[in-house]
Amino acid sequence: MKILGIFLICIYSVCGQDTYKGLVVDKVTKQPIPFVNIGVQGKRTGTVSDEKGLFYLYLDETKIQSTDIVQFSSLGYQTIEMSVSNARYILREHSKIEMRSENIILNEAVVSSTLLVPIIKPVGYRSTDNNNFGYWKDNKALGGELATRIEVNNQKRKLSSLEFEILENLSDSLLLRVNVYDIGDNDGGPNQNLNKSNKNILYTLKKHEVIVKIDLEPYNILVNSSFYISLELVKRYNNKPVGLVLAAADKNDEHIKRANNKPIGLGMTIPEKSKGTYRRYASQGKWIKVSNINMAFYLETKQLVSKDKAKKIEDKQKKDREKRRIVSGFTIFKGEVIPNVNIYNSRTKETSFSDVNGKFQIHAKKNDVLFFTRQGYNKVSLKIGKERALNVLMQL
């Protein structure tokens, strides 16, 4: 089996560390600011404030200098920077950080003299096996991120949704944030955040979820060239160590680099436009390229095209759907139908849900494996044979 360990959040010894408790608030309203990124620039020392604006920052004297810069940043607010020595003094004496709101810059509207309509244009990557993956591990370093470059043509589009696959999640619940970044001049990884809505894109990941799809429509994120999209760990809801594994895209001829017998990255010959995956260990940390493999981040985007072109695309998509085999049935528990069961095809990555009557439909062919999941029930897997109708018995 080919294993790719893309991302590792390190646990640091508490020896030589000072722990500072603080509160981040709006300078005018004095209201707490949740989920602020706080950390030492370019280091592996950082955290994220909680829902009440509270945070704990660990400053290790053996790993940082008094002249290093502590940075506070949040969507909709001006970034604050101060030296480590000043941060120690302020957090020891006052423990309150006040942030000023910044002027809101809205994404511009698209205006055209031609009658245009939106069409869905998928971009990104999907996985067809579980051989490559990225992961968060252990219980420190909130604000750690995995980011993959998404290649698109130079035509304006709106991001509609993000989809990714969970291979393993040891935690009951984790809070994730989606970030979208532009590409810097030298393409050294993610650059400026493209989310101008001033609203965090947050998702609470529950245990046993397999395919996650996050609605990006409310944030009105527009791109007109290639970009980076990332997932960031901002909160864990218990004291259990984090063990979150996400699917990465499939490549061949990989060569795994190892240190202390632990996989840390990957090197291989790749197409020029496949830019791979970057990570940073904690808030405000340095972006580092760790692999030429892309995370399996799959997005639906909307582009404006003429009505004629849109009709041609829709007709082709309809014909493709009609050619595909459909499997249908009911999800049942103790003789009663169960609604809202998630059905997932591990080959195609298609997802569906059973309706209020427990009925489901999903495209599948012989030998496909379907997974049935719902909170409070055990995951059920079924390998499809020749049948087109089947009932699935769920278990608590």
Image: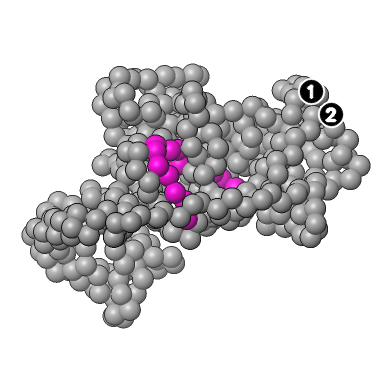
Which region shows up in magenta? 220-236
Of all residues shown, which one is farthest toward the right? 93
Q: Which residue is mark 2?
A: 85
2 and 1 marks in contact (CB < 8 Å): yes
Which is nearer the eye, 373 or 75? 75
Name above or below for residue 186 compared with residue 222.
Answer: above
Looking at numbered disc 1 in the image, what kind of residue is underneath it?
Answer: Thr
Question: Three-letter amino acid code at disc 2?
Answer: Ser
Q: Considering only vertical position in the picture, is 136 above or below 184? A: below
Name the residue nearer the viewer: 284 or 131.
Answer: 284
Residue 152 x %, y %: 34, 39
Q: Quadrant of residue 228?
A: top left
Q: Is residue 247 left or right of residue 206?
A: left
**Camera-side residue of 316 and 16:** 316
Q: Is residue 319 above or below residue 73?
A: below
**Is 127 on the left or on the right of 57, as rendered?**
left
Main secondary-structure element of the magenta-colored stretch = strand
Q: For the point 40% across and 55% down, which residue is it?
A: 111
Q: Based on the displayed image, in which of its 4 quarters is residue 356 positioned?
A: bottom left
Q: Quadrant of residue 233?
A: top right
Query: Residue, x 33% and y 29% (percent of image)?
Result: 274
Q: Which residue is mark 1?
A: 67
Residue 146 showing in the rendered view: no
Asked if residue 356 is among those painted magenta in the image, a careful observer would answer no
Q: Is residue 96 left or right of residue 374?
A: right
Q: Name the quadrant of the C terminus.
A: bottom left
Residue 312 in view here: yes
Looking at the picture, tell me which residue is in the foreground, 182 or 1. Answer: 182
Residue closest to the far front: 113
